[in-house]
Image (spheres, grey):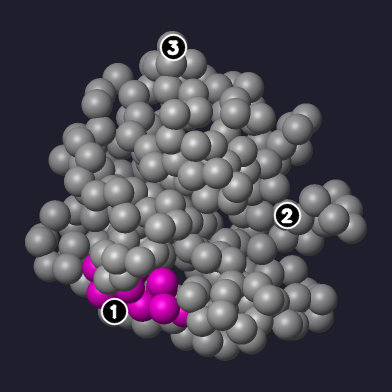
């Protein structure tokens, strides 16, 4: 079972890139973030023609998440992260596909920090941790996939001081990620590549793609039953170099 996550950075603008990648990689499940499309403006028909059925939570501007499944209907289980009924940002969706419970998440960026956006980021991560614990206790194979907006360690960002004040690398952000992972969840990419510099995001500015000045922001966390099935993981870096590309590359795992 091949599961991918891809911050598409505007699903309608980059629909051609997405469909081309789906045709080449053929993931069984693809989690999308940053749709930048309202609920009624999601390209469900075009993706159906490409062989994928979808559940999604759309929103204007920066948010929106979706789960695509190849040839089957995802069984929608949740469209929002619990813990704050006043939070209306479309950042979380959850569905069962072929016996695996898959959460697609787009965590808050948190900039500028300090400030209310950073406070929201940390509170959101704590809500995610609490919900992830509840999911893990079901005993089901659970995959938490998406853009966490955290570079967990110095190995997950190119050598630089330019991000020193960025919310993505603050000690509090990294501590929240470590607390989420804890002793129960497996960071799939790190499990396969413990010592390598692996990036999933390259900013459009300052020739960062050309210089390979990237960050690892997109992660798969696996519950113990899912982690036991982990066979492979990787990043489709070449997609970032395509014309009109998202600033993220797709990340994938293969479960036995």
Q: Earlier in the sequence, mark 1 or mark 2?
A: 1
Q: Quadrant of residue 114?
A: bottom right
* Up-down relation of residue 114 to residue 227 (above or below): below
Mark 3 surroundings: few (<14), some (14-19) or many (≥20) residues within 10 A: few
Q: Quadrant of residue 81?
A: bottom left
What secondary structure do most residues of the magenta stretch adopt? helix
* Up-down relation of residue 11 to residue 33 (above or below): above
Magenta-highlighted residues? 122-132
Q: Are marks 2 and 3 in contact (CB under 8 Å)?
A: no
Q: How many marks?
A: 3
Residue, x 72% and y 60% (percent of image)? 214
**Left or right position of 159 against 74:** right
Residue, x 62% and y 43% (percent of image)? 9
- Residue found farthest to the front: 86
User: Whole-percent x and y of residue 169?
Assistant: 63, 78
**Left or right position of 32 against 256:** right
User: Whole-percent x and y of residue 170?
Assistant: 61, 83
- Which residue corresponds to mark 3? 49
Q: Earlier in the sequence, mark 2 or mark 3?
A: 3
* Up-down relation of residue 105 to residue 45 (above or below): below
Image quarter (top left, top right, bottom left or bottom right) of the C terminus: top left
């Amino acid at each position: 079972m091949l599961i991918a996550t891809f911050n598409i950075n505007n699903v309608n603008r980059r629909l051609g890139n997405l469909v081309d990648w789906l045709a080449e990689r053929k993931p069984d499940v693809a989690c999308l973030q940053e749709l930048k499309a309202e609920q009624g403006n999601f390209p469900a028909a075009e993706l159906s023609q490409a062989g994928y059925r979808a559940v999604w939570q759309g929103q204007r501007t920066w948010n929106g998440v979706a789960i695509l499944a190849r040839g089957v209907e995802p069984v929608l289980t949740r469209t929002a992260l619990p813990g704050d009924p006043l939070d209306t940002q479309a950042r979380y969706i959850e569905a069962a596909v072929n016996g695996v419970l898959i959460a697609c998440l787009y965590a808050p960026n948190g900039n500028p920090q300090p400030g209310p956006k950073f406070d929201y980021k940390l509170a959101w991560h704590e809500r995610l941790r609490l919900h992830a614990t509840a999911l893990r206790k079901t005993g089901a194979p659970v995959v938490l996939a998406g853009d966490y907006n955290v570079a967990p360690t110095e190995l997950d960002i190119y050598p630089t001081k330019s991000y020193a004040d960025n919310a993505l690398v603050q000690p509090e952000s990294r501590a929240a990620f470590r607390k989420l992972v804890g002793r129960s969840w497996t960071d799939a990419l790190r499990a396969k590549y413990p010592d390598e510099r692996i990036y999933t995001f390259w900013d459009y500015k300052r020739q960062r793609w050309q210089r390979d000045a990237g960050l690892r922001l997109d992660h798969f966390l696996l519950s113990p039953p899912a982690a036991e099935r982990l066979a492979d993981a990787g990043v489709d870096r070449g997609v970032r170099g395509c014309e009109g590309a998202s600033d993220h590359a797709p990340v994938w795992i293969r479960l036995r």
